[in-house]
Amino acid sequence: MTQAYTPGLLVTPCLWWRCRRVLPVTGRVLVRLHQQVTAEEVVAETETPGDAIPVNLSRTLGVAPGRVASTLLVNVGDAVEAGQVIAQSEGLFGWFPKEYHSPITGMLESVSAITGQMIIRGTPRKVQVRAYLAGEVTEVLPDEGVTIEAHAAVLQGIFGIGGEAYGRIQFVCATPEEDLTADHLRPEHRGAIIIGGRRITRTAVDRARELGISALIAGGIDDQDLREILGYDLGVAVTGLEKLGLSVIITEGFGDIAMARRTFDLLRSLQGQPAAVNGTTQIRAGVLRPEIIVPVVATTAAHASREGISGLLDVGAPVRVIREPYFGELGEVTGLPSEPQWLASESKARVVAVRLNRGETVTVPRANVELMEGVAT
């Protein structure tokens, strides 16, 4: 039987999931091997150096570089406060001395008698890494981090913004075809992960930020709304560092695209459960998918998922078409011709036959479909 391989999105009710959580620089690991942790528990922490602010003190005070040290009112290595006078010139015959006030709270790191430049280092920033996955610590990396494993429902999306967020899953749309608007959101949703149906509107994102909602998840979003939410055109770099106060994940694509029924039904079965989400997305080499992780009790489905071959495109496999004219439609593979075929564009390519959920069977290039991994048909 003909087989092929293609990238795919995980949408599975139970999977043995492994998550490695490491610090950006060495620090302290706060948990021990085989310890059970919650998703929001801090498992490691460290401090990163504060911002360095260079100041040409020679020019600022109008003194020769070799005399800069004599203007200092504090020593190198001393702590300084924002607004504190840390240097002062003698002035002209003792009149009208010039002062320099520290722009930040931090430490005087260095002064050069050759260039007359001073560097003030900001207060170190504490960096904490949370477990993200509620489960067991199966590996401890000394001074770096941990590996955590657990059974979980795992759902990957097409695109997201905002980083990690935590909360309980709450539905506000009755069907996958219903848009997620500001009217669906209420004060009692504070801290929740809200599941919509079709499109997330810009006003819904604004309202969610006001209410302190952790994340919004739905089928699609309008690119103009996304531009207005961010305040700029999104490029092809990694997302996830946006300072929005919440995360946004779309599961299907851009535009008015209803959430896949399988995805919608799986999330509905997890209503009220605590979840962790991450909107970080990268579409170039080293693909990163936005994801929703919900700890679950182990089932036989977990073992089946572990034994499957990732990316295997075979007859009966559930897929999503990711190019026009069938963009966003779901279906099932019915055939994988072994020989390349001519396309309407007058080019030749290997193709796949897909029976769409609405009943029509179409033939598209294999590169135009994405496997819905972990989803039973």
Image (cartoon, helix red, strand yellow):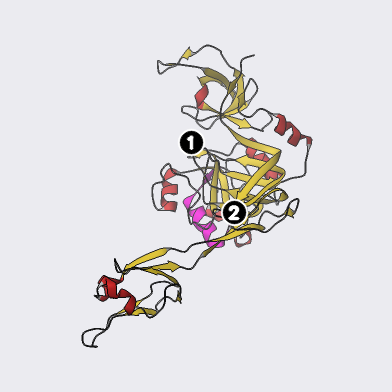
Q: Which residue is mark 1?
A: 285
Q: Does the magenta portion include 306?
A: no
Quarter of the image with the N terminus is top right
Amino acid at the residue labelled 1: Ala
Query: N-terminal of the two: label 1 or label 2?
Result: 2
Give the SS element for disc 2.
strand
Q: Residue at x 63, y 46 (%)?
A: 20
Q: CA separation, marks 1 and 2?
A: 25 Å
Please, is residue 67 above or below residue 225 in the view? below
Give the SS element for disc 1.
loop
Left or right: 191, with 303 as reference point:
left
Left or right: 162, with 261 as reference point:
left
Q: Which residues are magenta?
A: 198-213
For mark 1, does the 10 Å Cα neighbourhood hold few (<14), some (14 to 19), or many (20 or more) residues?
Answer: few
Looking at this rendering, what residue extends furthest in the top direction?
Answer: 339
Amino acid at the residue labelled 2: Ala
